[in-house]
Amino acid sequence: MRAWHYVLYACGQVGMMCLARFFFQWNMEYAREPVGDGFLLAPALLGLLLFGFRIFDGVTDPVAGIISDRWVRRGRQRRHLLLFAFALPVVGLALIFRPDREMAEPLRWALATGGMFVFFVGYTVYAIPYWSLVADYSGDDHDVRRRLSNSLGTGMLVATAIIAVASPAVVVARGYFEAALWVGIPATLLMVLPFFAQPGPQPAAAAPAGPEPTLGEMLGTAFKDRRFLAVLVLFSGSQMSFTVMTAGAPAIASEVLGGTAGDVPRLLGPFLLGAFPFFVLVPTLSRRLGWERAVVVASLALGVVYAGTRFLDGEAPSPFLTAGLLFACAGPMAAVLLGLEGEAVTTCARESKGELTAIYFGMLNLVVKAMNGLAVFLTGVVLEQQRFGLIGPLAGALLWAGVAGYFVLRPRGGRAAPAA
């Protein structure tokens, strides 16, 4: 693959994550818009609705994986599935942010509910085949697989930076609905580009011989793969730690460092600056160490950095400078974890019985979403108890727990990740 192939592929992650980050960053703030003596959408009820859709979203991930893998087994190219789904998330996002003060309350809730349904269905139906293209586009070339996986992690952080920096100004200037369109339309166009990232000629996929596996057989293959289960636990720990630090960053900025929630970019900025340059080195690191060793080492090191936030003190001469340096140290390890996740899942899937790449991605998404819900709950407990200094150690403990679970589950004397 040439450089522009990787750029086209990464554009899909940037676009999709821009839509997701905009939704999760602004949905509660939007709901709190005053209408008479109440709110545009009752935040507690909206949170309950969102929780229900997160469950729905997680359950549909393996279903999308089954559909995607069966599509390939019938001799079709997986990338064509992107064309069926790329426009759905922006339609859902527009519906979610369409309610206004002039509408009757039932209509506001109908738009929000319908929008979430379209958004989460579109996100899942697009994301699972899109991530699975790592296997389709790389084939048996480990170097290409590493670079494609790395582009997913890079795209996620690029989207995070775009929404964190640009979306507040657009929301203030244009309002929530127009801001959703200003963000959503360019993001949707980016989501088409991975279709054109396939290198070389584009032959029709050959359908494998043998009977098509049933739903139970496909899920059973994933659940019986101990190496994949170990990887699930390993990345669940890292994703839960990211969730804890994201949810707890405002409290660290305001309660620990003595600033305000508006100072969160002073923590996020150094983190991103530390992560972005390191993405260049992630494929080389994977090639030299193997993705398993690289992920384990990065998880242990990031746990130490996060636990170090326990010693931050707002009474220090330069609290945000100290915190910024610490968060900058977290960036390279986060780049490794985000950059190698796709390679890890794809490698496990290709080494399993049959070609079940999308099923494996679906299972990863299902488990990670469930564990992120637990991470939010744990963070809420810490915040409610006003033990703000424990946010970082909690994130570090989750990383170490993921590594411990990985070594417990990983088959002894099993397959080794290629290191060259």
Image (tube, helix red, strand yellow):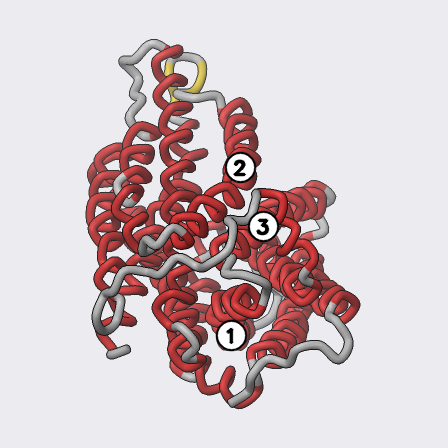
Query: Viewer-nearest of labels 1 and 3?
Result: 3
Q: Which mark is residue 54?
A: 2
The local crowd at label 3, few if under 14, some if 14 to 19, many if 20 or more residues have their Cα within 10 Å, is: many
User: Callout 1: helix, strand or loop?
Assistant: helix
The residue at 43%/43% (across/down) is 124
The residue at 49%/46% (across/down) is 66
Give the CA distance from mark 1 to mark 3.
Answer: 29 Å
Quadrant where the N terminus sits is: bottom left
Mark before the other along the chain sequence, 1 or 3: 3
Note whether 51 is above or below 389 in the view shown: above
Total marks placed: 3
- The amino acid pointed to by label 1 is Val
Q: Where is mark 3, residue-wise?
A: 218
Q: In the image shown, does 368 or 277 lie closer to the viewer?
A: 368
- The amino acid pointed to by label 2 is Arg
CB atoms of marks 3 and 2 within 8 Å? no
Q: Is residue 356 visible?
A: yes
User: Callout 3: helix, strand or loop?
Assistant: helix
